[in-house]
Amino acid sequence: MFIGHFGAALGAKRLAPELSLGTLMLAAQLVDLLWPTFLLLGWERVEIRPGASGAVPLAFEHYPWSHSLLAVLGWGALVGVGLRAAGASTRACAVAAVLVLSHWILDALVHVPDLPLAPGGAARIGLGLWNQPLVVLVLELALFAGGLASYRRSTAARDRIGTRALVGLAALLVAIHVGNVFGPPPPDVAAIAWVGQAQWLLVMLAFWVDRHRTPAR
């Protein structure tokens, strides 16, 4: 699950117009923004093992601090409290916190049973839709298309950049998603971690796009 998370963030703009798209994407993708750092620190582990997770060539061996349900609930609460301290409304804080949780829910649809419920617990969750790549592809693209359409209806371009930058962001996300789905397996775990860090650039790009758009009436 990649582009579907960004679709959730785009769609949430309608529910929390005061929040920047960058903030919403940060919330929706927070789990996967933390994970690469935890890999580099050695706190979590993944193996490149084609066929281990259906169509995904990765075996997620240990990632309780970023991807367990209990940890995700904690990260969501932290995001909500942080936004509240920064002056956001209760509604906006709730939307951002739910976006963090939505990442785990969407992952649970596609992952094989490898998502822990709590650090140290033995239970693992996952419906395994990765074993049906076409279904996942349609699902993710539908989520993204719906979220993008909602964002476009919920905002209006302030200038020409507001229109062109949104198209560019959408095209970039689709291109990355296609590369993820149809590209070769990563060469090593370090490459996964460093490429994952590049997702922060997508968040910054979303902040820039949103600065050139305004909530529609």
Image (cartoon, grey):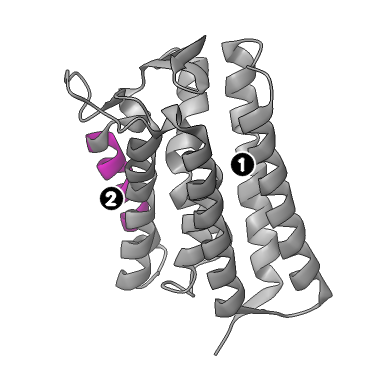
Spot occupied by residue 68 in the image (x, y as percentages of width and height): 28, 31
Residue 1 at least partly seen: no
Q: What stretch is highlighted in magenta?
A: 70-81
Tell me if label 1 and label 2 are in contact, CB under 8 Å. no
Magenta stretch encompasses residue 55:
no
**Mark 1 nearby-residue class (10 Å; few <14, some 14–19, many ≥20):** some
Q: Is residue 123 left or right of residue 112?
A: left
Spot occupied by residue 25 in the image (x, y as percentages of width and height): 52, 53
Q: Which residue is drawn at 67% across and 75% down?
A: 213
Q: Name the residue under label 2.
A: 77
Residue 63 at least partly seen: yes
**Mark 2 nearby-residue class (10 Å; few <14, some 14–19, many ≥20):** some
Q: Residue at x 61, y 39 (%)?
A: 199
**Element on which disc 2 rests:** helix
Q: What residue type is labelled 2?
A: Ala
Magenta stretch encompasses residue 76:
yes
Q: Residue 200 carries which label?
A: 1
Q: Which of marks 1 and 2 is nearer the N terminus?
A: 2
Quarter of the image holding residue 144?
bottom right
Q: Which quadrant holds the C terminus? A: bottom right
Above or below 146: residue 171: above
Above or below 64: residue 69: below
